[in-house]
Image: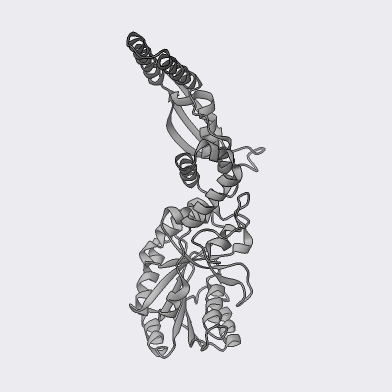
Amino acid sequence: MEYFTEVASTDREAMDKINAKYGERAKILTRRSIRIGGVLGMFTKEGIEMSGYLSDDIHKRKKLNLETEKKKIIETAKSDKTIQNVLNEVQSLKEYFDSSISGVEKKHSSIETIENILSENEFSFSYIQSISDKLKRSLTIDELEDLNLVKNKVSEWIGESININKTDSFNTSKVVILVGPTGVGKTTTIAKLAATHGFNSQSKYAKSVRMITIDNYRIGAKKQIETYGEIMGIPVACVESYKELEQKINLFQDADLILVDTIGKSPKDYMKLAEMREMLDACGTNSEVYLAMSATTKISDVKEILRQFEPFNYKSIILTKLDETMRIGNIISVLSENNKSLTYLTDGQVVPQDIEEVTSKRLMRTVEGLNTGYLVVGSES
């Protein structure tokens, strides 16, 4: 039995190399992350090493299928069918034999182009594969020849996969809690939300807003939110325990909206996350949790953050730091695959301007290489 090992920068690249060299005979046994490249151990980058073996079963099956096709042709020739039917059978056998020799299914050039575009925009491998499969199922060969049409279809499908939670919930929620990892900009986002629903509200009557922070450990955090509150004329309270938080929630019952800023936690800090979850129970049943996540987060970390903050029962996600990255296929694909929605996005540090409601059209503007200049089906204008 023959064995092989291939090294590449990504899973996709490794699979392409294996398919190109060994075809359907290749059976993957192991996959592991490694460091590749560099000089004297420095400047290396993440890579993938895949190992496996070459199976002889495929050739045996193809040989068996070939004999079956020969028998079919002989039986056809013995019957009273026309010569044209026999020729058709011969042509089918030739096409089958040709494809068997290649060992690799030939992919349409338009599909390859789309896969490359999505990969450059950092969509997940599984999401790219789902789009590729949908193109094969949904479009004819003639339609695939029209790359502009293909790009329009893919843009439409991506737009439809973006799940949006309307901001109307902020008009019905009494208490809104913002959780998330360290460094994603929760405090600034809380200030932007306070301004958006408070003195900067576009409604006839601005909401009465209060802010509470339980982040008394990070240097400058308390001062930062107090400064925002002073500028906007919004009362701010700092608490350190379940009892203090419960008291402040009760004290602010006259307000229309109470925004709660939390301590940034690593998704791997299970104990601290559990403690904070218990403390937030003081906010009562009339509260909703939103998860703040940076647009710069890589795919594997997005998945981990979604999983570790699941116990908070967050309603939706607020995407921050959109101004700090050129690609967000990582966010779009992972949220779609996990059926998570987006509500707001922030794209700068300025309060209150750099925050807006999420629309499919706005997010699609970040995807380069597709026809995204038109109004995506199902998105807001």
Using the image, determine if residue 305 lies above or below residue 344.
above
Please state if 338 lies on the left or on the right of 381 as rendered.
left
Q: Residue at x 55, y 39 (%)?
A: 144
Please state if 126 lies on the left or on the right of 372 as rendered.
left
Q: Residue furthest right?
A: 39
The quadrant of the rendering that contains the C terminus is bottom right
Q: Residue at x 48, y 85 (%)?
A: 210
The picture quadrant where one finds residue 273 is bottom left
Residue placed most toward the observer, 48 or 367: 367
Residue placed most toward the observer, 103 or 124: 103
The picture quadrant where one finds residue 351 is bottom right
Residue 298 visible, this orientation: yes
Residue 35 visible, this orientation: no
Question: Where residue 55 appears, x then y in whole percent?
Answer: 41, 21
Using the image, determine if residue 161 lies above or below residue 277.
above
The picture quadrant where one finds residue 84 is top left
Q: How is the image coloured?
A: one colour
Question: Where residue 336 appears, x then y in whole percent?
Answer: 45, 55
Residue placed most toward the observer, 335 or 274: 335
Question: Where residue 114 appears, x then y in whole percent?
Answer: 57, 43
Question: Where residue 5 appears, x then y in whole percent?
Answer: 50, 28
The quadrant of the rendering that contains the N terminus is top left
- The total of numbered circles placed on residues is 0
Q: Residue at x 63, y 49 (%)?
A: 369
Using the image, determine if residue 302 lies above or below residue 232.
above
